[in-house]
Image (spheres, rainbow, N blue to C red):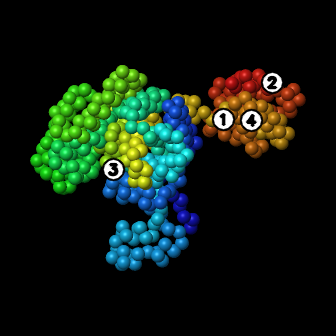
Amino acid sequence: MAQKPSIPKGTRDFNPEQVAKRNYIFDTIRGAFETYGFQPIETPSFENSDTLMGKYGEEGDRLIFKILNSGDYLAKANEKAYSEKDSNKLTSSISEKALRYDLTVPFARYVVQHQNEIEFPFKRYQIQPVWRADRPQKGRFREFFQCDADVVGSKSLWQEVEFIQLYDAVFTALKLGGITIKINNRKILSGIAEVIGASDKLIDFTVALDKLDKIGEEKVKEEMLGKGISEEGISKLQPLFTLSGSFESQIHSLESILNASEEGKKGIEELAFINKAIKELGLQTAALQLDVTLARGLNYYTGAIFEVSAPEKVKMGSIGGGGRYDDLTGIFGMKNISGVGISFGLDRIYLVIEELGLFPETVTKNIEVLFINFGDDEALFSLKAIKQLRLQGINAELYPDAAKMKKQMNHANKREIPFVVLVGDEEMKSNTFTLKNMNSGEQFKLSLQELINHIK
């Protein structure tokens, strides 16, 4: 009995309509990237494991897909690790490569490897799939595309300002109003950790804080206690859990909370600069919001942190995010190269646009006219016309088989093709074409030029 075909959990097939809609989003994002001066690059789908491991925190490392070494991978495995069932040591001896977890770390590796070819500041964009061994759920997949834009080689905060404008430009172009660009600064998080006496537990603190909107205040406090952060320190965080109001009022509140932390005060200054610039420049449809609990849980952010939320009426996680990373390339031996970047979550953006019914009808436009096949002579005559239609930018095709007329017409209806062309002996003799409008049922006898004009 033949095996029933299936695909791995967290992956998907895409039909022609879905691919067309995805391409609409890709093209919109790509167009904005290029308008803002970003250049495209691509990196391999898998990297050496040591390039990726240790860059995303403990939780991120667990979600990296490892690739088994080719051949008899167990032959050279660490026997002690195998006998003791030490999975970490065993994995390192049977797997030297891994699927990329995101596009940022591979980009940092790219910059270091190609530093002599790059003109800094370097603005790059990258649209490629990534893989995470996550638990599949709505809007979360194990294979998905990221659309990233980064600048390396500049510490200027004007880059952060431009990225906020870029987010606004893309979502405005997609007719996706009501999105919120949340911003925080890692220096503020470091300052808070310092104030509560948990500087040595900054990663534990930020990972827990980043879960506030998912698990709530009490669970976050429990997790912090479990990580060794004192009750006294956690009590000092209380103002953060209730911080609200305008960007300016939150900044004012933070100034009093962080007056004893130089690092924290620097983060406040950076956020104030960005907010002032955006207020002067204005945004088209997006809103900028300060969220001091935003941490994103990644080790490499050192300055601004971004996260984009879908409109409130749509229940969806973040649809974009990013931040400043001053020392990411230092991991690969290239010091003092600052970078900042953002990412668009293609799959979640697709779900939001679909739920709100915002895809333009023209996105799924396919074949505009189908030529009915009555035999070889008629088919050849039709293909000569089809060639001219295609040169005029009209999507046209010939039904491949000289099947019954009803079957060919049903095919056009099922594919929602608006026009069919019938070519018989009479049309061939008079060098004309009978065009049928499949919606109205009207028929016209036209010359080739008239046919082109009518369809256009």
Residue on which disc 3 sits: 299
Name the residue rendered at 65%, 24% in the picture. 440
Residue on which disc 4 sits: 371
Depth check, front residue: 390 or 402:
390
Label 3 vs 1, first from the N-terminus: 3
- Establish if 314 lies above or below 296: above
Name the residue rendered at 52%, 33% in the picture. 37
Dot 2 falls on a residue whose secondary structure is: loop
Tell me if 66 is positioned left or right of 446 in this view.
left
Give the amino acid type for the residue marked by disc 2 in the picture: Ser
State how far apart marks 2 and 4 are (Cα): 15 Å
State how far apart marks 1 and 4 are (Cα): 11 Å
Q: Quadrant of residue 60?
A: bottom left
Which mark is nearer the camera, 1 or 4? 1
Residue 447 is labelled as 2
Q: Residue furthest right?
A: 429
Name the residue rendered at 87%, 26% in the picture. 430
Residue 367 is labelled as 1
Specify the quadrant that holds the C terminus: top right
Specify the quadrant that holds the N terminus: bottom right
Q: Which percent across, then down, holds residue 290?
A: 28, 33
Dot 3 falls on a residue whose secondary structure is: loop
Depth check, front residue: 434 or 243:
243
Callout 2: few (<14), some (14-19), or many (20+) C-alpha neighbours within 10 Å?
some
Q: Is residue 134 visible?
A: no
